[in-house]
Image (cartoon, rainbow, N blue to C red):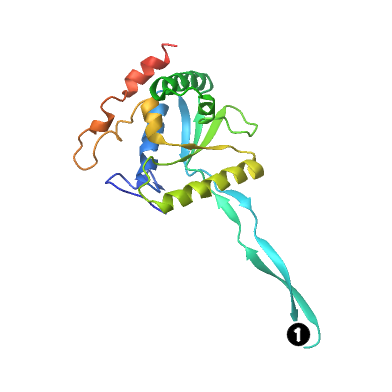
Amino acid sequence: MEYFDSGYPKYYGDIKLDSDIEYGFACWCEEMQQMGFITSFKIQPNEFLLMSNLDIKVDKQLKTKIKSEYKPLLKQAVYTPDFEIEWDTIKYVKFMESLLWSIQKIFLQSNIGVTKYLFLDECRQMEGISTVHDVKGTNDRRGAATASSALRFSYQQKLLMDTCNIYCSKLIPDKIYKATFVPTNWNKSPKTGKKFPRYAKYRSREQFRRSIFAF
């Protein structure tokens, strides 16, 4: 299902996006890659099988015998994360130090332990650091649809961990921008080209980069 509320592009390269929120976070990932924190990122990277088709055996009475056949009861369940990020190992540590400090300062959270898992290294054994994410908006504009989506992701997240041993974290990009920086192409109206007043106090990419290496 697609959710576009503005004139932002519906494609990033040749990848068809599901929402303008995905476009904004893709811009953030691109700028993080330009700074060297991210080595690569993929949008809607892989489809993971959470549950196979479930068939049931049904006996059918023929004229002279009983024929057994299998009929589908439940379709397979699959899930595709919104993003997969490959990190520079050294700069990943610097980034996490800055993110924890920024969120504690900006949101004044006393319990920030869960923040560490926003960009948790997925649990597969592999070289480097790779994380997978599902991005969500901040506004409950779609009412029941949003609540249903949140519940569905909660189940998908658990099944992905159980079946594939991969942790997929939920990210709210606007909160990430507030803790880090707002992407250049996201911080302007696609219709007028003017910057958004709501991001006036957010850091620029250069301010963020300097803060990282102040640690």
Counting from the top left corner in percent of width and height, residue 66 is at 79, 80
Placement of 1 over or under 202, stated as above or below? below
Specify whether 206 is left or right of 154. left
Q: Is label 1 in a helix, a strand or a loop?
A: loop
As drawn, which residue projects farthest toward the right?
64
What residue is at 37 percent from the left and 51 percent from the top?
Answer: 142
Based on the displayed image, in which of its 4 quarters is residue 68 positioned? bottom right
The answer to whether any part of residue 116 appears in the image is yes
Counting from the top left corner in percent of width and height, residue 19 is at 38, 47
Placement of 104 over or under 75, stated as above or below? above
Based on the displayed image, in which of its 4 quarters is residue 60 positioned? bottom right
Number of residues whose C-alpha sits closer than 10 Å to that of mark 1, classed few (under 14), some (14–19) or many (20 or more): few
Task: Give the quarter of the figure containing the C terminus.
Answer: top left
Task: Give the quarter of the figure containing the N terminus.
Answer: bottom left
Specify whether 139 is left or right of 193. right
As drawn, which residue projects farthest toward the front?
110
What residue is at 41 percent from the left and 27 percent from the top?
Answer: 32
Counting from the top left corner in percent of width and height, residue 120 is at 55, 30
Q: Amino acid at mark 1?
A: Leu
Counting from the top left corner in percent of width and height, residue 57 is at 73, 69
User: Which residue is denoted by mark 1 in the rendering?
Assistant: 62
What residue is at 65 percent from the left and 45 percent from the top?
Answer: 163
Nearer to me, 155 or 213: 155
